[in-house]
Amino acid sequence: MNAGDLDRRVQFRRATLTDNGLNQTEGFADHGSPVWAAKRDVSDGEKWGAGQVNASILSRFQVRASSFTRGLTAKDRLVCDGREYGIIGLKELGRDGIEITAQAEAD
């Protein structure tokens, strides 16, 4: 992964519980500082093969590995270019990177 490939800023969000006095509701709040990432949208052919045929955007993001990015989970969310993605998979790319597969609803 080259530094020039990391051309997007992404913000991660983590679930939080808010108590309004009557009940607790789950929401998401920014988690950590934005990080640089590379983004690649999954082709329709790949989505079809994976059984993903709904109106959504499936993307893969690559970020540099750090103690922060290694602590991310599928319960977290990712925001890129104003669109919020649910994380559906994380995997290591050697010792230096992490690939995040994420899905967002299409407009």
Image (cartoon, grey):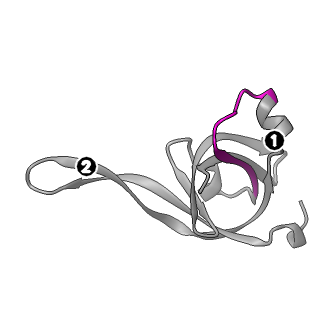
The foreground one among 83 and 79 is 83
Residue in the image at 51% along x and 49% along y: 76
Q: Are marks 2 and 1 in contact (CB under 8 Å)?
A: no
Q: Is residue 97 left or right of residue 81?
A: right
Residue in the image at 68% along x and 58% along y: 66
Q: Is residue 1 left or right of residue 24?
A: right
Q: Amino acid at mark 2?
A: Thr
Tell which residue pokes out farthest to the left in this image.
22
The foreground one among 49 and 85 is 49
The foreground one among 2 and 84 is 84
Q: Is residue 16 left or right of residue 1?
A: left
Q: Callout 1: helix, strand or loop?
A: helix
Which stretch is magenta?
A: 49-62
Give the x, y percent position of residue 49: 81, 28
Give the x, y percent position of residue 16: 34, 53
Give the x, y percent position of residue 5: 87, 67
Neighbourhood count class around disc 2 (C-alpha, 10 Å): few under 14, some 14–19, many 20 upward:
few
Q: Is residue 22 above or below residue 12?
A: above
Q: Which residue bears the numbered disc 2?
A: 25
Give the x, y percent position of residue 74: 56, 41
Q: Callout 2: helix, strand or loop?
A: strand
Q: Which residue bears the numbered disc 1?
A: 44
Mark number displayed over residue 66:
none
Q: Quadrant of residue 39?
A: bottom right
Q: Is residue 43 magenta?
A: no
